[in-house]
Amino acid sequence: MDGVHDMGGMDGFGPVQPESERDPVFHAPWEARVLAMTRAMGVANGWTIDMQRFAREELPPHVYLGSTYYQKWFLALRQMLIDHGRIGADEVAAGHALHPAAPLPRGAFTAANMERIMRRGTFDRPASAPARFKVGERVRTKNIHPATHTRLPRYARGHVGVIERIQGCHVFPDTAATGEGEHPQWLYTVVFDARELWGADADATLKVSIEAFESYLDPAV
Amino acid sequence: MTTQDHHHDHDHSGGSELSEMQLRVRALETILTEKGYVEPAALDAIVEACETRIGPHNGARVVAKAWADPAFKKALLEDASKAVATLGHLPRVGEHLVAVENTPQTHNIVVCTLCSCYPWDLLGLPPVWYKSTPYRSRTVKDPRGVLRDFGVTLPDSTEIRVWDSTAETRFVVLPMRPAGSAGLSEDELAKLVTRDSMIGTGLARAPGAA
């Protein structure tokens, strides 16, 4: 979706505010609880990483831009729990459980499940066809605007780049996000000259790459 | 926006006045616990692991090893997940980790414009600025400006390469080994490796620098 989360190249957000490397991992105790609950409920419900990203992208634009990182996580988690029928809006208002629990697809999250959280998932899958593009080949990204989740950022649509690496065959986020399945595809690192993306005045020493799924790409003629 | 205004001298004293967010989050945890969806102790364990087990200290060990051992460096640049797995003393990192090398000719910077993808199993959870709108919006267009925000100026002739983490591949920068570090042990080298140098918004420390 063409949402505010897709912010590569937007102006006006001001300077980056570096942070001391000695700063704590969490800046308030509730942030840590939000992260832990999100991870735990993701595992217990079998929600894919892209389903969770999509939920955050669907926050209203003013909420997305006006919330801190963990506020966004909290709002998206609570909405997913409601949308999937795990909790009720009346329970949120009451601050307590009012109804019987719903069965969770993977069962309740207990301390015994810890290692599943700390081990990153694997996203590569067996390929059903050879890779369409070769390293060094010129490709053009498609000009697509799906209303749902995609990982092709707006600033990199409709531009010519070069295949630099072939990263294997990976779960396709655009379908994984909506529960339509994994539909694995070849994944490529595609590198663009900054002047291709940002025009003739762009920094001539800058190159930008994205990780692009095969269906995002056409051969450049 | 509030991420940018955050000061670190509040909210840590455990005062009696709970913030609105704290109350809302506590309410959700209460509901999930009462329904039996999650054990609070399991949440405690996740938090503890995020605060102690993972972190940039792990990445620093990998960089120091690459500086000290050319064969390991070669393996790391070929397949970082596999190379890191050979170092038994580190927590297991996931697949699809890619290490990219800074040289006098090329400086690499990692960003995620769409969300906050970050090699957390090697570097820990990302800092606030990495997840902020200024960093996510500007890095792909004006990386030299972003570097200036970090006090880093590179020669005009250095090529800048920005890696936008738009899939499940995860990037870690192998910073240049600082001058004057010859003869240091791996432990001493690891102390020169900053988190920001492994994201590409900083350089490794010079020996003797604070």
Image (cartoon, rainbow, N blue to C red):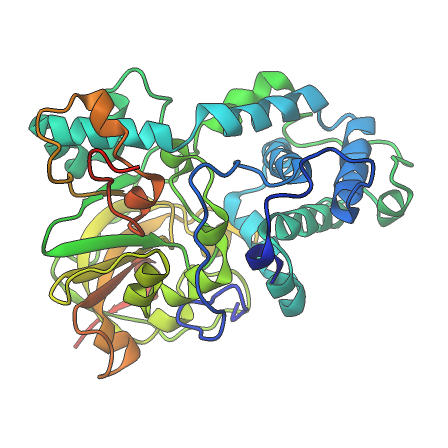
Residue A41 vs A163, above or below: the answer is above
Q: Give the number of marks.
A: 0
Any part of residue B83 in sight: no
Any part of residue B7 in sight: yes
Residue B208: quadrant of the picture: top left
Residue A33: quadrant of the picture: top right
Please state the horizontal and vertical placement of residue B15, each as a whole percent of the image.
78, 35
Please state the horizontal and vertical placement of residue A97, each as a whole percent of the image.
87, 35
Residue A170 vs B50, above or below: the answer is below
Please state the horizontal and vertical placement of residue B59, each as a whole percent of the image.
31, 32
Please state the horizontal and vertical placement of residue A221, each as a whole percent of the image.
16, 77
Task: Depth check: give the residue in front, B6 or B82.
Answer: B6
Task: Depth check: give the residue in front, A163 or B164.
Answer: B164
Q: Is residue A157 left or right of residue A105?
A: left
Identify the residue shown where x is 59% and y is 57%: B5
Identify the residue shown where x is 27% and y is 23%: B85
Residue B61: quadrant of the picture: top left
Task: Depth check: give the residue in front, A124 or A36.
Answer: A36
Task: Depth check: give the residue in front, B130 or A39.
Answer: B130
